[in-house]
Amino acid sequence: MLDRINQLVEEIKALQASSAEEAEQLRIKYLSKKGLVSQLFDEFKTIANDQKREVGQVLNQLKVLTQDTITALKETHEGSQAATSGLDLSAPGVTLPLGSRHPLSIVKNEIADIFARLGFNIAEGPEIEDDYHVFTALNFPPEHPARDMQDTFFIATNPDILLRTHTSSVQVRVMEKQQPPLRAIFPGRVFRNEAISARAHCIFHQVEGLYIDKNVSFADLKQTLLYFAKEMFGADTKIRLRPSYFPFTEPSAEMDISCTLCGGKGCNVCKYSGWVEILGCGMVDPAVLDSNNIDSKTYTGFAFGMGIERITMLKYQIKDIRLFFENDVRFLNQFKSAY
Ligand code: PHE
């Protein structure tokens, strides 16, 4: 029997097939129930016990060799068959184009990440607001120009309902719900009745920050914003605070950073001043704390608000704010980021 097995091994090694059908015929010849290899397995039962081990081993090797050889023959022909039918099984797969995050989302996430490292969490409020949360609770006098029809979108049937003009309304929403210590940022969309140009849009995005606790000082505000500027724009970035006015902060300031394009030497982005404005900020006005049931004798706080479009334009040197809202994929595809 060993001789016949060895003979078959040689035969199998020399097998050839010119088509997949021929290979299938070979499979039937050798491996089907009555095939030559299978017949040997039947005979194996009659072999003397002391030979079973040796013969069994070579017989199994023969079976594996036959299976592998015939499968390989089949595969070569199946491949070429596919080729003549116009299918190239070796062609690389079609890669689906990956989307990318909107640049404003990338920068918003990056801002959130920087402030998370300082212990700020995230809160949100409604885009459709009432006069109380956007203006009254923030100490805006009734005749303040920001309430004017020219700046604010009102709901036609009810002048008390409006689209929020800033995310500072979320300060009020948060103070209503929570007593200090309080440390959070509020990203969101805001609306202003402005003519659309390369530098202004009627819809844009802000990130507001609010920190209220015992002994919060202007130095804390400055250091927090310096940390933010360096993390966002690079370690060489400098900041400058200029006195300003907001009804809900006292004192108030506007913050400039050293120009991201020229580094402070002067260029057309910073209008040759070396500085660009990025946010408004200040110490929360005690009147705002008190009207929101936070004791201004015990607590102090700071707040700031920045436009995400502006930060993004400076970071990526984008010259026209309208690009953010056109959703041209040629523009959007340029932003690949970890955020
Ligand atoms: N809400 C102000 C604006 O939209 C920015 C600001 C926020 C200023 C918080 C001071 C404190 O211009």
Image (cartoon, helix red, strand yellow):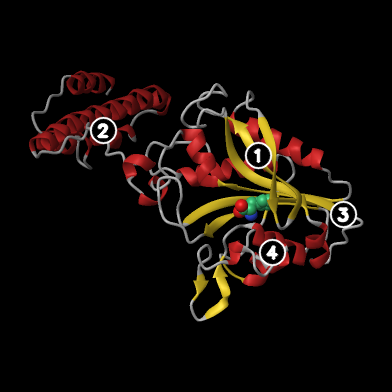
- Residue ID for mark 3: 299
Residue 71's spot in the image, x, y percent?
23, 32
Is tag 1's residue or tag 2's residue first in the polypeptide sequence? 2
**Sequence-earlier tag: 3 or 1:** 1
Which disc, if any, is residue 255? 1
* Mark-to-mark CA distance, 2 and 4: 64 Å
Q: Considering only order in the chain, which callout, 2 or 3, is on the residue closer to the N terminus? A: 2
Toward the bottom, the furthest residue is: 157
**Kind of residue sitting beneath label 4:** Phe
The answer to whether 219 appears left or right of 242 in the picture is: right
- Answer whether labels 1 and 2 touch (C-beta < 8 Å): no
Report the Cα–Cα distance between label 4 and label 3.
21 Å
Disc 4 versus disc 1: nearer the observer: 4
Does any atom of ligand 1 lie closer than 8 Å to the CB of label 3?
no
| Mark before the other along the chain sequence, 4 or 3 | 4
Q: Secondary structure at mark 3?
A: loop
Which mark is on residue 92? 2
The amino acid type found where label 2 is placed reads Pro
Is residue 186 among the parts visible in the rendering? Answer: no
Q: Residues within 10 Å of mark 4 (few under 14, many from 20)?
A: some
What amino acid type is highlighted by mark number 3? Answer: Tyr
Residue beneath disc 4: 140
Please state which of residues 317 and 12 is positioned toward the viewer in this rendering. Answer: 317
Classify mark 2: helix, strand or loop: loop
